[in-house]
């Protein structure tokens, strides 16, 4: 595949802020539809072009508005009515880049402003030349707002132009229709409205679009509606140089929105209509300015500056942070992050461990309010976790492998793609067997607490999650009388190439940690906060539960390092066959091993899909020696195919820890290229949220050496030779710090009011507000 | 719009059997998708091209499989999984006629064989030349079978070719998804299967596709499935002159099928899998031969031969008959005809008066078994008609204006398109107010009975419909004490430009006829068939009902001719304003009057949408004098805009009756051009069933002079000057006749065993089996 992307555009203020598409090919539309996804956490739109092409996928998702098409499917984020499609007829021919010819084509996403712009010259088949400019944004200032602008300028010619633009409620999720037909209406011959309700969850969606068309000469306009659609039609004649400008201001409100949830459908409609009447008066440029201001406030808190041989490195971290902000519903703790954000239908908008383990650290360390909101989501969905435990015969909080609306519980689909041999669809077992998610949630809470010191959150939500997840593990452990030990059998670990696994290292160690941690905080609360403890004791019978857990804690079997210091990934891994994996390690596309082996055969090979033991050594780093980390990194890195986008970042970070810095940089680049690289199909289903979170972790926690260890801030940087310096902002227990690591040394700018304890390169410092430079100090 | 159709292709055996598209334009895809629709009465597929284009509409409908998306919509024929799409990549570029260039393009429907063929040369952007041929048919021999064939021949070049083809269950009706996701499976790595169930009516659909690919050299193939899809992928390298041939044999079975309705879903799957295993062994060419033989049997019963100045006239009648056979579910009396057949989503597959008044005469006179089946449908749906009467406060059988599954009752949607002034969707009142459908059904029964003499049908179904419909009218009449008359107020007549009408001439006269006819046959049964009468008496309390109806019959108000012999269309029509309608009479597109007037204003003008009084004079021709017909034809023809496709044929037939033969021919041509003419958008929603039935009526009943009057066969031809002769076959009371009318005279070939009484040009004849020629006899 030819790389059609251009990462080098932009100088001065926009240097390393622009991601561009340099040429257009309908076969690779999915790439830029996903990587140019626009959004604001409330909603996101996939960036399908205004004109339509075969194979295009238009998506607009609103966070948390889950609906289940019918009982044979699982709930998912519904693809709501589209406002981005615009049909343009020039001299009675529907405009398309596949007709005639075009040049000077550029489609560019500005990560700083959140605006997507597309410009080109197009010559139609009759030889008439037109200059086109399309731009759009989803407002970061007004969560309900989508704005588009189209300008068409005939050059040395004139033409009849017809523009058809409106609201299209025919959208589906690959055929599954989540909405009733709905009611369409037009106000003042100008504000077009569509009101639809989801068919199962009964959520009302109100969409409006208001158009403003400017050009020389007369315009005839009217509105029409047909099934599931309402739209405006404009007819005009454009002369040489006379630019035609169409602005389309659209909004979306739903009955799930917190600010309008008290309103009845009529009230919601009126609210939304008032909103569009007001906003559409401002016009595109004014609304864009408001949105850019909101983006600027966010960037000022998170912008990382990388001086590197490769400008791409700077762009990659901004790209990751841009998407993390676009996909994260920071406005409402009832929602979390989908594995593909809003950029595609992949994984149905469901939340996985991707949130707590891969994405959360970015927020915990730099936007802690958002991290809290994401963790509150897990607190609010405890009822679903209880239900899952109950259904499976356990107690406590058994978090769903895939999570959607708060009380949905487990929403992992039951069936996947076809088995090549039998022709039957294969069963998906992660929902039942991939248990570690429950520890991952507790881990996210623990890390958040120790980084932020947010006692309020812990009292109201955090401790309960600690205890409730530990109770689950207690009920899940299997006792072996002979050896007087507890085991966890028949699971899937992070390495999903191994099903029906006993004593998975990651699962068992994390479960042990989860119980240990709960007991620790139970004891802490006894000492420090009897009121909270009493409340939770009543709710969860803690005295009884914690006593029982204390009894089993040290009997939980945790795979230990062997003579070569290798922790066996599970109880059978070390006995599996060793084969030459170099062919698959150098693969161009993931999962190439499936071309030679089927899942049963892969199960018998020492091969790992994604970071598993390595992930354990990263998360519970305080529990393992450097020697064990080094040995296991080498052992597992050679056996890991990185066939999941979740894998590379953990290996990259651990590579830094074990002084494999060249490899770390290579893994960072490969991780960055999952979405941003030359593979034009890798993002078809959407961008990779966990990988994007992982990129932040490689930069901050890997190269930047940022860690919370034992409740303390530690900075132990390891810069690859390509990178001269990295500046990253964090907030440590409420205190904002700017950390700069460079070849020369480390400098900290304590921008807060508090003195902060930091361990830098194994030396402890107490840093007062103000600047500190290692090469000046030492 | 440029006419892209070619009606002159084909000589010899295929002369006037071919309808062709001479050039391809994505803006006008709807035209040929609809007019090239393939089918066999069990199912029909809209002829979207194999490769995909923006704006394309793929449809596959199976008769009677109605499903309701949700309670806010009405039930409709669901657009089931597609097997016609085939993606072809040449040198890694998706093939499309919009790329590169093509010549020698022809897409041709052969009306005789039911095969659709498309051939062209295509040069890709790299200058490589390929010869393409696509062909397909829906078998008339095996109702469940769809076959496609693709051949690609590289000319002076070689290329990598990838073909992706399968079953796509993402299809919707303009966004409404009627199917569960379903289960996909592949058997023998070859037979791909999709099993889906409708979400409300619980009808199982089983689709299979089996591919056979032939070419020189190696082919790598595999199958894949993703959401709602299962498909094969073929990769090969094709060299100069080496033709690549793909055959795709597909089938569809449903749990609504009579022959498999006893099977459980597993049984249905097995049945369908066995079917595809067997049929796919035969191959495209063999299966096509079987289908052609079945078509030949049908054509031998119905083929009309027209000698005309214009070959188009011959083509037009064949085109009409082809589509009537494609759309009519002749295999099962539980189904009737949709207003657009299977050729589009328009009117949702619902049955209107189009069936009985416009289409039925063709079947009654030439394929009476099918006519009987269509009327049995109305008998089987009496429960829905009773329910409608009850809901509206009446008794008897009040037939639904729009009819779907047997017990659905009224299924007319409640809301239509937007009012231009208010921006609100407008209410659709026909379901509540357009009452004449009930008389129309009785009329269809009556005509069928008197043409066929089918006493068996009458005993079991026909009489009951007569009585039950009359009882409805009795309950619907409104008594005016002052004048001691009965009225029918607040209706919509056939002229739908007038709502809330009192004493509509068509409605009142037909209601009167309906009651009168019921009383007549009640008396007849008393004399001739006491057993049947007793049974129906018990069921319908006939003695009581008929006595009451006899009492009111002569008091039913029926608008009478005024001094100028004009029958007022309703009680207010004659007082409406007269305006110059010439602008709208010469319109290029229907409903142009709405550009100047809204519905309220049109209501105040002496303007008629479609045949209304004229229709009455045609249906109840025995009740009106020639003078009345003549006067009213002139009066109403000048006031009728023919803004419905149902209008032209009735005016054309009556024009023959009143010696307006040039006008009749002009109306015939205009009617034929509704689907077959140069307007490239008129068939977007599907072909016009009633108009196609009307074309047969113009030829047979208009020019050919065929009528049943007072139970007797009458032939009174009126040939326009362009037409030299017409031969049409009919079956009169079981006896097949070939009628030839020409400038020289009339000849009859009585091919049956019975002597037949015929009135020819007002003289009565008794014709024995054999030939009879008027110019020899007289």
Image (cartoon, coloured by chain):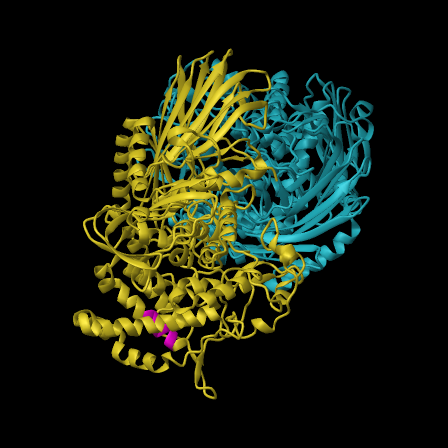
Chain colours: A cyan, B yellow
Instruction: Tell me which residue sits at (70%, 47%) in the image.
Output: A234
Instruction: Decide: is B533 above or below B98.
Output: below
The magenta segment: B468-474
Q: Point out the image quarter for the N terminus of chain A.
A: top right
How far across and how far down the image is residue B686, in percent?
48, 46
How far across and how far down the image is residue A465, in percent?
53, 48
How far across and how far down the image is residue A661, in percent?
63, 18
Q: Point out the image quarter for the C terminus of chain A.
A: top right
Instruction: Decide: is A277 above or below B513.
Output: above
- Is residue B587 found left or right of B303 in the rendered image? right
Which residue is nearer to you in this view: A261 or A425?
A425
- Is residue B402 found left or right of A686 in the rendered image? left
Which residue is nearer to you in this view: A632 or A331?
A331
Instruction: Decide: is B8 above or below B589.
Output: above
Which residue is nearer to you in this view: A238 or B365?
B365
Which residue is nearer to you in this view: A304 or B349?
B349
Can you name the residue that lies furthest to the left here? B531
Q: Is residue A374 visible?
A: yes
Corner quadrant of residue B450: bottom left
How far across and how far down the image is residue B673, in percent?
51, 45
Instruction: Tell me which residue sits at (44%, 48%) in the image.
Output: A547
- Is residue A385 found left or right of B749 in the rendered image? right
């Amino acid at each position: 595949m030819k790389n059609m992307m251009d990462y080098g555009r932009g100088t001065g203020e926009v240097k390393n802020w622009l991601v561009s598409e340099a040429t257009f090919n309908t076969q690779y539309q999915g790439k830029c539809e996903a990587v140019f996804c626009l959004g604001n956490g409330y909603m996101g739109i996939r960036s399908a072009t205004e004109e339509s092409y075969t194979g295009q996928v238009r998506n607009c998702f609103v966070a948390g508005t889950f609906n289940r098409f019918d009982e044979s499917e699982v709930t998912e984020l519904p693809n709501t009515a589209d406002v981005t499609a615009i049909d343009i007829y020039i001299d009675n021919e529907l405009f398309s880049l596949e007709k005639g010819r075009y040049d000077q084509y550029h489609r560019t996403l500005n990560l700083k402003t959140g605006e997507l712009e597309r410009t080109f010259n197009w010559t139609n088949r009759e030889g008439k030349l037109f200059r086109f400019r399309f731009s759009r944004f989803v407002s970061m200032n007004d969560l309900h707002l989508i704005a588009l602008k189209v300008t068409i300028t005939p050059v040395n010619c004139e033409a009849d132009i017809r523009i058809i633009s409106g609201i299209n409620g025919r959208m589906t999720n690959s055929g599954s229709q989540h909405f009733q037909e709905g009611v369409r209406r037009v106000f003042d011959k100008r504000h077009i409205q569509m009101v639809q309700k989801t068919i199962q969850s009964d959520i009302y969606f109100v969409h409006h679009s208001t158009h403003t068309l400017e050009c020389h000469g007369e315009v005839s306009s009217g509105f029409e509606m047909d099934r599931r659609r309402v739209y405006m039609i404009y007819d005009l004649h454009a002369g040489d140089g006379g630019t035609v400008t169409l602005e389309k201001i659209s909004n979306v409100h739903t009955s799930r929105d917190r600010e309008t949830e008290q309103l009845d459908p009529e009230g919601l409609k009126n609210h939304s209509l008032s909103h569009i009447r007001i906003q559409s008066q401002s016009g595109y440029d004014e609304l864009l300015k408001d949105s850019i201001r909101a983006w600027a406030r966010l960037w000022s808190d998170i912008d990382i500056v990388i001086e590197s041989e490769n400008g791409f490195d700077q762009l990659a971290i901004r790209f990751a942070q841009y998407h993390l902000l676009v996909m994260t519903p920071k406005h409402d703790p009832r929602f979390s992050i989908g594995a593909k954000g809003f950029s595609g239908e992949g994984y149905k908008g469901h939340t996985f461990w991707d949130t707590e383990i891969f994405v959360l650290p970015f927020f915990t360390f730099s936007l802690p309010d958002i991290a809290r909101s994401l963790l509150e989501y897990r607190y609010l969905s405890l009822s679903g976790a209880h239900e899952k435990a109950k259904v499976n015969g356990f107690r406590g909080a058994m978090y769903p492998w895939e999570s959607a609306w708060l009380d949905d519980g487990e929403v992992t689909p039951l069936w996947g793609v076809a088995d090549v041999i039998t022709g039957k669809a294969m069963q998906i077992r992660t929902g039942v067997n991939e248990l570690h998610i429950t520890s991952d949630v507790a881990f996210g809470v623990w890390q958040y607490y120790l980084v932020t010191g947010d006692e309020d959150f812990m009292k109201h939500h955090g401790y309960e999650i600690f205890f409730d997840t530990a109770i689950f593990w207690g009920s899940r452990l299997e006792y072996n009388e002979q050896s007087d030990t507890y085991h966890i059998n028949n699971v899937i670990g992070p390495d999903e190439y191994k099903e029906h696994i006993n004593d998975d290292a990651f699962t068992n160690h994390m479960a042990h940690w989860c119980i240990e941690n709960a007991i620790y905080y139970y004891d802490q609360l006894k000492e420090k906060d009897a009121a909270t403890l009493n409340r939770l004791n009543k709710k969860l019978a803690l005295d009884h539960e914690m006593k029982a857990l204390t009894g089993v804690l040290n009997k939980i079997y945790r795979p230990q390092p062997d003579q070569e210091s290798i922790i066996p990934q599970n109880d059978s891994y070390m006995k599996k066959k060793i084969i030459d994996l170099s062919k698959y390690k150098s693969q161009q596309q993931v999962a190439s091993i499936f071309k030679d082996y089927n899942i049963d055969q892969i199960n018998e090979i020492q091969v790992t899909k994604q970071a598993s033991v390595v992930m354990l050594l990263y998360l519970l780093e305080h529990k393992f020696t450097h020697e064990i980390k080094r040995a296991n990194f080498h052992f597992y890195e050679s056996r890991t195919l990185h066939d999941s986008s979740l894998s590379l970042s953990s290996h990259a970070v651990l590579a830094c820890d074990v002084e494999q810095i060249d490899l770390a940089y290579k893994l960072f680049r490969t991780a960055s290229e999952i979405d941003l690289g030359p593979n034009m199909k890798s993002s078809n289903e959407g961008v990779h949220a966990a990988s994007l979170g992982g990129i932040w972790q490689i930069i901050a926690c890997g190269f930047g050496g940022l860690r919370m260890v034992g409740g303390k801030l530690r900075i132990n940087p390891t810069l690859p030779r390509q990178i001269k310096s990295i500046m990253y902002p964090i907030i440590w227990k409420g205190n904002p710090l700017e950390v700069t690591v460079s070849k020369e040394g480390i400098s900290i700018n304590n921008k807060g009011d508090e003195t902060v304890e930091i361990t830098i390169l194994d030396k402890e410092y107490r840093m007062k507000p103000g600047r500190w430079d290692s090469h000046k100090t030492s």
